[in-house]
Image (cartoon, rainbow, N blue to C red):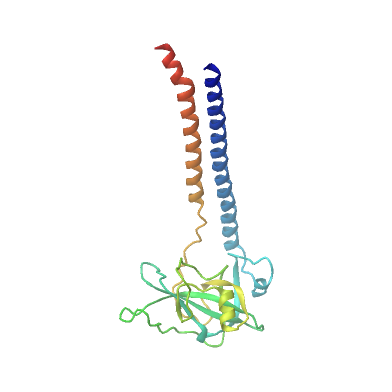
Amino acid sequence: MTAMKDRRRAVVLVAAILGVALTGRLGWWQLDRAAEKRAIQSGLEAGEKAAALPASALLEAPMPVHRRVRLRGEWLADRTVLLDNRPMNGRAGFYAVTPLRLDGRHEIVLVQRGWVGFDAQQRNRAPMLATPAGVVELEGRVAVAPTRLYQLGEAGTGTIRQNLDPSAYARETGLPILPLAVLQTVGSNADDNLPRDWPTPDLGMSKHYGYAFQWFALAALILGLYVWFQLLRPRRQHHV
């Protein structure tokens, strides 16, 4: 009987050690992920303060994501896409994305130019959008793609869409579109006066801290249960 109790205690001890080790390791892993995100955030902030890169930087590897870039080229106004369900400053509307053919080159980059409201009477009608003709100059922030939302099914192929993938749009149109996007922040020399209050990229650091707290709390719970049921409670029962 004593041997069986000893084996049971040994099994419980091993299980408790493994449980605390596993949950603790998962907690530290979440903290490591948060640290990585903090480093990325620091890079973003440094990139915002750094001088704007020339358009040629978009052709280099690795892609300068979140860096400021200065572009010069001509709009392909007839290829403009409106991203639906994009509010700004509490108002519903679209993000306007227009391809820009880089000056002196054949490459084209998708530029998320700004926000435009929709027609309340005809929700699905594309609003009139003034697009400056000729060569324009602008600054923006490099992104992997225009701002995305979760969607069910295909993104669609019309002027109004839920999302726009640069590579997919290049295949659709046959245009030499670069596999990235630029979120315009500074207007061109022939500005269109579109609002550009882009949301700050959310890297989800708070999520990792929350998960870390949950894992460490679970480790503490396992340890506390072991100490109570295997050490403290038997001693109290022994002294009764």
Q: Visible in this render: residue 143? A: no
- Seen in the picture, residue 64 relative to 100 is either above or below; the reply is above
The answer to which of 59 and 122 lies nearer the viewer is 122
Can you tell which quarter of the image residue 165 is in? bottom right
In the rendered image, the quadrant that contains the C terminus is top left
Q: Position of residue 205 (x, y in %)?
A: 51, 51
Task: Tell me the residue at 33%/81% (across/down).
Answer: 122
Residue at the far top: name it.
239
Where residue 140 appears, as percent x and y from the top left, is 55, 71
Q: Residue at x 57, y 83 (%)?
A: 173
In the rendered image, the residue lying farthest to the front is 1
Q: Given the current orientation, which residue lies at the most extreme left position?
A: 121
Whether residue 71 is visible to the viewer of this picture, yes or no, is yes
User: Image quadrant of residue 48?
Assistant: bottom right
Above or below: residue 218 compared with residue 73: above
User: Residue 239, percent across and down?
Assistant: 42, 11
In percent of the image, x 59 and y 74: which residue is there? 167
Q: Nearer the viewer, residue 204 or 12?
A: 12
Q: Residue at x 54, y 42 (%)?
A: 27
Question: Where residue 179 sits in the image (x, y, percent)?
Answer: 61, 73
Q: Is residue 227 above or below residue 218?
A: above
